[in-house]
Image: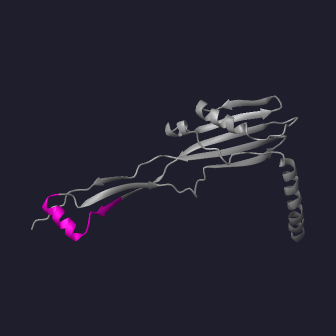
Amino acid sequence: MQLTKLMACQLLPSLVLIAQHENRNLKVNVEAFQYPPLAASAHIEGDVRFEVSLSGQRPVSGHPLLKLAAQSNLGTWNLPPLEDGKYVVDYHFRILEPVKKQETVLIGDKLDRFFLRLVGAPTKKVINSCYYDRALAPRTRYTVVKDGSGYSINVFVADHERCLNTETSGTVQVSHL
C-alpha cells in the first residue's frame, strides 16, 4: 500500500507537467467577458455551444443574443489547431437572484413618534433591500478538460437580477391618550 502511494506521489507531478505541456498554447480569455446587458435586462439565460475544428468555428445551439456575445469572446481566444480532434466550447449563462431582506424600522426617536401618533402619521417604515454575494458566484470562470483527441471547455457566466432598495411607510399607530 505504501509503495502504491509513493508511486502515485511521484507520478502525479509528471502528469501535471504533461497536461501543462499540451495546454501551453491554449489561451482562454474571459477576464473582461461579461453577461450581455440586453440579455440580462430581458432575463435571457441558457447555454450556447460551439465546435471549433480545423474547418473553423461552428455555432451549434443557443439563444441569438447570448450566441453573439459568446462568439465575439471566442474570437479572442488562442486555440491551437487539432488535427484529429475538436474543441467543444459551452457557455453557460445564468442570472442569479439577489438576497432580499425586508426590515421594519421606527421613524425618529420617542418624541418624534409621539407627535406622529398625535397627527395619525405612521411611526414605522418598511425598508426593502437586496444585496449580492459576489464571493459565492463570481461573474465569469471556466474549466478546460482534455477529452480524448479534443478539449471540452466550459465557461460559466453569471449576472445578478436587478433590484431596487425601496422604503414604504408602515401602518399608522394611534395610541389613545
Stretch in magenta: 103-120
Task: Using residue 27 as the reference point, say whether residue 165 is left or right of it.
Answer: left
Colour scheme used in the picture?
one colour
Residue at 31% over, 63% down: 105
Q: Position of residue 46 (x, y in %)?
A: 59, 38
Q: Position of residue 12 (x, y in %)?
A: 85, 60
Task: Using residue 76 as the reference point, say whether residue 68 is left or right of it.
Answer: left
> Is 117 contained in the magenta span?
yes
Q: Position of residue 21 (x, y in %)?
A: 87, 51
Classify the position of the N terminus by image quarter.
Answer: bottom right
Residue at 13% over, 59% down: 119
Q: Position of residue 89 (x, y in %)?
A: 72, 39
Residue 173: image quadrant is bottom left
Where is 111 relative to 170, above or below?
below
Count of labels in the image: 0
Residue at 89% over, 61% down: 11
Where is 117 relative to 168, above or below?
below
Task: Using residue 159 as the reference point, say whether residue 3 is left or right of it.
Answer: right
Classify the position of the C terminus by image quarter.
Answer: bottom left
